[in-house]
Image: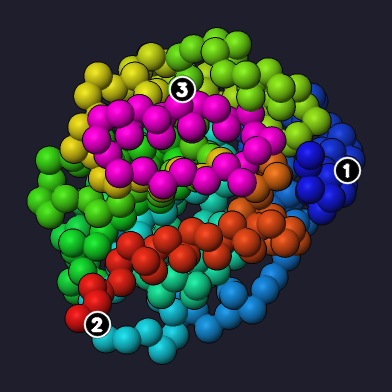
Amino acid sequence: MLEPQSRALLEDLNAMTRAMDMGKAPDLAVAARAQAVAIFKAFAGRSDDEERVAVSGIAVAGGDGDRPARLYRAEGSSDAALPLIVFFHGGGWAVGDLDCYDGLMRALCRLSGAVFISVDYRLAPEHGFPAGLEDAVAATRWAARHASALGCDPEKLAVMGDSAGGNLAAVVAQVVREDSPPLAAQYLLYPVIDSSRPHAAYPSRLAFGDGDLFLTRDAIDGTAAWYLASGGGAADHPRVSPINAADLTGLAPAFVLVPAFDPLRDEGLVYADRLRASGVPVTSDVGAQTIHGFLTFGVLDVCHAGRRRIANDIRLRFSPPAD
């Protein structure tokens, strides 16, 4: 059963989106971005977990020149080499930005002690596949080269993303598989894993994607179409649908989190199972009785519990071994 706070949030969120009639928008992508910003702002909340974090604007390498990014470091963090996590925001490869995810980045940074880089990758449909992916790969390799200068350990480099950003993180992990030092972890938060199969391939898409639980099947299809509008790739290509990769051996250990009432739940779990079958260490979590995107909805208690769950995994994964 959907937990009560999420149910109440959905009532407010659905009323909000109904009031935002995008049907007459001259540019649907621009209107969708404005709607996303309004939603993130309305339900972002605030907690003590987001305090005492130093934030600075930086430039990282992208696929076609430098890209803006934000660096997050907990105030008072030790001088020891820290984990460095490169984050890609969600939004169907087309909406969302650094501001929308600022609260999540602050909280994860503070709770885990890791340093985070949030990347402003190029968005579709103006910049379709592979532009956003090229930015994500370039930013990850930039982070590997500059980790030491940032006070981080290049052997403790991870990627993380939610929704479409989780797709980018999963694909980046495949692309950089042979890099040295290897990627230490991949955090896939309710990721888009498969744009190639019909919705019926995943029962969660049919059960939860009809419009009552925030993310819809129409939105999944529409943003994928925007992402592929440039003709640079096909939906079944492994760089678009990472579940279609023929070989998943040797990938970085994975943390896969999916909420129970998310249309993307089942494909995330199927990908986790494929990774395990390929010998990749996987931690998967499907305990949260909530909806897609919940980690950015700071008004929910389950949001903060999820953030602490991720941060705890980071701390345990990268803590120095006991003497």
Please report the bounds of the magenta region as a residue range: 259-287
84 lies left or right of 163: left
Res 47 visible: yes
Quadrant where the C terminus is found in the figure? bottom left
**Residue 113 x %, y %:** 41, 75
Q: CA distance from mark 2 to mark 3?
A: 39 Å
Q: Residue furthest front?
A: 323
* Amino acid type for the residue under numbered disc 1: Glu
Q: CA distance from mark 1 to mark 3?
A: 29 Å
170 lies left or right of 229: left
* Amino acid type for the residue under numbered disc 2: Ala
* Amino acid type for the residue under numbered disc 3: Asp
Q: Does the magenta-highlighted stretch encompass residue 150?
A: no
- Tell me the residue that label 2 is attached to: 80
Residue closer to the observer: 88 or 32: 88
- Tell me the residue that label 1 is attached to: 11
Residue plotted at (54% across, 51% down): 97
Comes first in the chain, label 2 or label 3 = 2
| Dot label at residue 305 | none
Which image quadrant is residue 254 in?
top left
